[in-house]
Amino acid sequence: MTSFFSLFPLLFLSGSVTPLESMPRWLQIGIEGSPLRHSIAITSGLFLKGAELPELWPHSSPVLVERRVTQEDLMIARHVLSVVRA
């Protein structure tokens, strides 16, 4: 039930269902920090618009930061599990 209240708003606000330009300005500013919004912009740019790297580069840094944070979280979780199991 928690995923319904967290994932659906993120999906709808990411620009995959409605264009970002149709949202209020305060919401557009808030959505800019979402890695999902940038991932969708990269994917749609590649597959639907035929965009090249210079056009997609501004969207890549939030995605790479999120990936790095996720990798660090996984490393910490593995360490904690190894300590708990020992």
Image (spheres, rainbow, N blue to C red):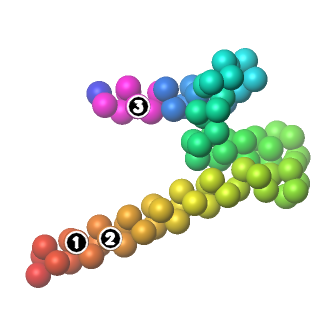
Q: Which residue bears the numbered disc 3?
A: 6
Which amino acid type corresponds to the residue marked 2 in the rendered image?
Ile
User: How far apart are the alpha carbons under marks 1 and 3?
Assistant: 27 Å
**Location of residue 79 in the rendering, given as x and y in whole percent from the top left corner:** 27, 76
Where is 68 relative to 26, above or below? below
**Location of residue 76 in the rendering, given as x and y in whole percent from the top left corner:** 32, 70
N-terminal label among 3 and 2: 3
Q: Which residue bears the numbered disc 1?
A: 80
Which amino acid type corresponds to the residue marked 1 in the rendered image?
Val
Residue 20: say if magenta: no
Residue 7: say if magenta: yes
Judge by depth and name the residue closer to the eye, 65 or 19.
65
Q: Which stretch did the figure color magenta?
A: 2-8
Q: Tell me if label 2 and label 1 are in contact, CB under 8 Å.
A: yes
Is 32 displayed left or right of 73 in the figure? right
Quadrant where the N terminus sits is top left
> At 64% from the left edge and 39% from the top edge, which residue is drawn?
32
Which mark, residue 76? 2
* SS at mark 2 in the image: helix
Which amino acid type corresponds to the residue marked 3 in the rendered image?
Ser
Is 3 displayed left or right of 28 in the figure? left
- Residue 37 picture quarter: top right
N-terminal label among 1 and 3: 3
Where is 44 relative to 80, above or below? above
Mark 1 neighbour class, 10 Å CA radius: few under 14, some 14 to 19, many 20 or more: few
